[in-house]
Image (cartoon, rainbow, N blue to C red):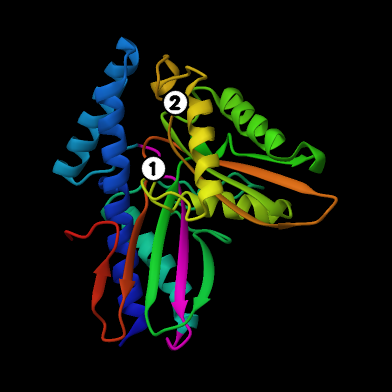
Amino acid sequence: MDIESLTEKVGYDLLRLAVTELPRDVKEALQKAHREETSEAGKTQLKAILENIQLAERTHTPMCQDTGTIIFYIRAGAEVGRLEKVENALIEATRRATVEVPLRPNAVDPFVGKNTGDNTGRNIPFVNWEIVPGNSLEITVLPKGGGSENVCMLGMLVPGEGLQGLKKFVVDAVMKAGAKPCPPNILGVAVGGGADVALKLAKKALLRPIDQHNSDPEISELERELLEAANLTGIGPMGLGGRFTVLGVNVDYAARHPASYPAAVAFNCWAARRATARILENGEVEHITHRNR
């Protein structure tokens, strides 16, 4: 198969789907929040969000003006050839999507302040690689909005504080973020490794559907506790008060150094955009998050 042209096509399709149609788990969580929200202001905000989602799907236009910074996650089968072509193909897919979807240009040179105009630049789109057994290529795109990115937090906790310290850190992060990340949010939480490892794992945790709990029962219980605690803050939809500040919490971890306890919280706004597809050996494409496409 022509890996370069196929990857460009799939990358473009994923970007288009991600910004115009939320994954099923996120939509269902927002619908549940609307049904169960007791705050009149919060319920009104959730109603507006759901109407916005429907309008985006019907008109095939982005659901939010901030189409985010483009991040790709690749799970590449070790038997797939010409992997060196993949990153350039995803850059071209991003340029095409910027014009045709369209996406707001969000890639700015940090030193001179110039917008590149096509959502590409040095290390953007950023591509995360994972080599796995097999002969398929799985691609996930995460268009990460600036509001939710600005409140992500890293903390180097005292190891002796343990889980209680982690719980306090997460709730404090939610309180400090307030309305800035356009709640209700999804949280990716990670501990261990080093500072960079914790942040990377926290952001990657946002890719897991929020209706799929961690396979470790103890971590799954921690996710439940953090979700309950975050929603007790009362920040509510768009910061106007209510029961639903957070829709889901996904936790991951790495082993840590005995003297270190790095912890990270990555926020996603209610427009928790992501899309995943798998390119099979025969060139067929299997959509994972948007199966009806």
Quarter of the figure with residue 272: top left
Vertical comparison of 151 with 138: above or below: above
Please check the rendered image and state whether residue 71 is part of the magenta-colored stretch, yes or no. yes
Q: Amino acid at mark 2?
A: Thr
User: Label 2: how many residues lie within 10 Å, few (<14), some (14-19) or many (20+)?
Assistant: many
First to last magenta residue range:
65-82
Vertical comparison of 281 with 191: above or below: below
Quarter of the figure with residue 286: bottom left
Quarter of the figure with residue 118: bottom left
Residue sitting at the far right: 259
Which residue does the numbered mark 2 point to in the structure image?
245
Q: Residue at x 63, y 27 (%)?
A: 172
Q: Report whether residue 63 is seen.
A: no
The label shown at residue 272 is: 1
- Disc with the residue nearer the chain's start (1 vs 2): 2
The quadrant of the rendering that contains the C terminus is bottom left
Q: Report whether residue 193 is seen.
A: yes
